[in-house]
Amino acid sequence: MKITTRTRRNVSDAVQAGEGAGRPPGPGAEAFGHSSAGRRGRRGHRPGAGALSVLASVALAAGLVASGVPGAAAVQAAGSSGSVDSSGSVDSSTDSSASSTGGSDGSGGAGDSGSTDSASSADSAPSEEVPEGLEDFYGRQIAWGPCEDSQQEQQAAQGHDDAGQEAQQAARECATVHVPLDYDDPSGQTIDLALKRLPASGQSQGSLFTNPGGPGDSGVELIDAAEGYFSEDLRQAYDIVGFDPRGVGQSTPLECMSREEALEEVSDESTLEEAGGTDALEGEGQEPSPDVSLVEQAVQEGASLAAACLEHSPVPEIIDHMDTQSVARDMDILRAQSGEEELAYLGFSYGTFLGAIYADLFPGNVGRVVLDGAMDPSLSMADIQYSDAVSFQASLTSFVSYWQQRGDSPLTGTAEEGTAQLTEFVQGLKDDPVPDPEGGRPLDDAILANLLGQLMYDDAYWAELATALGPLLTDRDAQPLAEWLTSMNESISPEGDPDGQGPQDSEPSPEELEAAAAARANAPAITAINCLDNPVQGDLEQWEAQFEQRAEISPLFGANERAWSDAFCSGWGRQAVREPAETRAEGAAPILVVGTTQDPATPYQWAQSLADQLESGHLLTAEGNKHCAYRQGSTDCVDAAVDAYLLRGELPQEGTTCALPGPGEDTGDAGDAVGPALQEVLDGGRQTPDQAAAAAALTSRTGRR
């Protein structure tokens, strides 16, 4: 999503936007990030934390500043960054500018030395189509090679029944490509982009590029989960390509704390308190002054976090060049270096904003493009946060209505009245938290609000959520909720584990901790992107008024001003590169826009607006309570329509509407999909080992891992 559709997340008013702090689930955060990324694989987990402490970890993970809530990181398996094997994938024709790349010090790239571009000289695009000054970048060809110590090897070791899936896992390839740091100075410093692709299992018809959302989620990691995100037909016909956008993950990264600090944080935490459940929320362990408003705190925190990023990033200048327009220009270079005349693309959540910006910049290079969970490029930051407050509140009301209709809800009256009762209960936990039956951190308002916000992304969780919440609301009994989380945690034990305990009995490896530390340091990438994409508008007085308005609309999810707001970006202090404006993409091939009617993170009206703005926009509607629609259970309608366009160029009939499965309904083969739900929780790259394990447990219930 563009700014965030929350791709960024739920955050609570008690949580800070920087340093990966958790916030109350809500629009503010999401409004700054939209992601659909999910993660698969074994996560490190430490024993000893109570089930509600695990819940606390999930809640904190859900609000991490660098993750996206719809929609997507923490502990990525050792080596899963997808490095390029230096034994053959590096071409000797590397441009001389490579010595000035951000990856030359080993900080960037797909895990190799970072200073060598895995692209060879070749005429990848007609010279007349190449932007002036970029001829050398466009004239290369990506040299794909084996991925070193990839996550695929660990997954294969855990055992898979599907031999075909194992074969595709083994086929994944990686590369590193250099692009200009500053497109206004293409002959200057370069940075690294990390790429991973899943080659077509059949006859390839070309490359299909993708972005999972965020902003700031990893396209490299998305390819490790490709079986969940893309249908078998797409995987058979396309080489599916993901990349970490500039400043993110294995590309030349933005880093906002020292690696030592990050390692200390992820190494010492086994409970939320040890992880900084209190101090981390305030950045440096300092309680905010009671004389300073939340909005003023946001300004101060923005300035402090930006200073930390400038201090610790291997290429400090990256902070000013992570905007989506630059990422779109990177993607056009990648298209050309892949030998494609036109871009085939499937973007989720914030990835739709990237796709729309690309189409506007390069309409003549647009091929078959699908944008699922659309953002509206014409909206300001305040507009997005307002829409998020409305949509998350609507989803909460839909959940309450479902629960009431089920017949076992303690919430009485209309759905709106029941929602008010649930809100009052959650808010009451601030001063009177419910003890954790296993002795961990008590269940307070911030934890439960975060959990509720995350679970609004996908109604597949609603049946079990309602069952677990009943005793909590009627008897202040948290045991069923704790047991639900525990059962989900146990359900992710890897096959073949002798004691059946899996992650619960295993300490994270040094490699996993290192990956988690890198993700922790990189978490504020979402902030850098959003603040560059959205100019600051208003002043303290207006921001205070907007905060109060959103809090009134959605008391649980709207009161999180410190999550990617105009106030925070004013303190961040970097110059935005674009103004909110409609995206026309005049002359582009048809672009299929997919919108879900009750999407909390990217409201349906955003999809309607984007489809109307685009000269060649075509809207496909999905009815349901989910973030994004593709691979969410509508196999014969949504999935079929998206595949038909990407594979054959066949658009659905105007006005086509599909139904997504509701709570408790069969999701078909989507049950094993990663899917674009619960962005924050799913985004492993922004989580600690404990948080990742808890997130994996939470999402494993519906097959999203």
Image (cartoon, grey):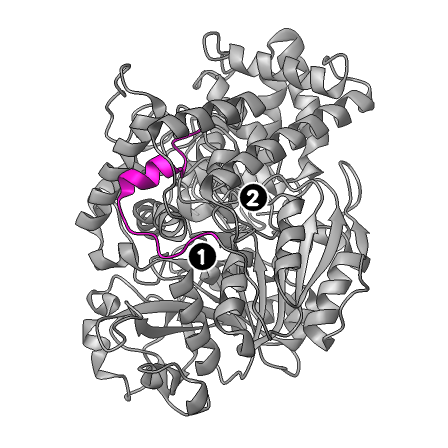
Within the image, what quadrant is residue 547 found in?
Answer: top left
Does residue 271 appear in this view? no
Label 2 or label 1, whichever lies nearer to me, is: 2
Q: Which class describes the residues within 10 Å of circle 1: few (<14), some (14-19), or many (20+)?
A: many
- Mark 2 highlights which residue? 70
Q: x, y percentage for residue 674?
A: 61, 52
Residue 218 tag number: 1
Q: Nearer the viewer, residue 434 or 593?
A: 593
Report if residue 574 lies within the magenta region: yes
Which residue lies at the image location 30% right of the left edge and 57% below the top edge? 253
State whether the magenta stretch is mostly helix, strand or loop: loop
Residue 256 is left or right of residue 327, and the answer is left
Within the image, what quadrant is residue 203 found in?
Answer: bottom right
Q: x, y percentage for residue 603?
A: 63, 43
**Circle 1 sits in a helix, a strand or a loop, which is it?**
loop
Does residue 387 appear in this view? yes
Q: Which class describes the residues within 10 Å of circle 2: few (<14), some (14-19), or many (20+)?
A: many
**Circle 2 sits in a helix, a strand or a loop, which is it?**
loop
- Residue type indicated by callout 1: Ser
Q: x, y percentage for residue 455?
A: 61, 34
First in residue order: circle 2 vs circle 1: 2
Q: CA distance from mark 2 to mark 1?
A: 14 Å
Q: Is residue 673 above or below residue 126?
A: above
- Residue type indicated by callout 2: Pro
Which residue lies at the image location 36% right of the left edge and 26% below the top edge? 541
Q: Nearer the viewer, residue 293 or 123?
A: 293
Q: x, y percentage for residue 94?
A: 27, 84
Highlighted range, magenta: 560-580
Residue 238 is left or right of residue 381, and the answer is right
Report if residue 682 lies within the magenta region: no
Residue 513 is left or right of residue 420, and the answer is left
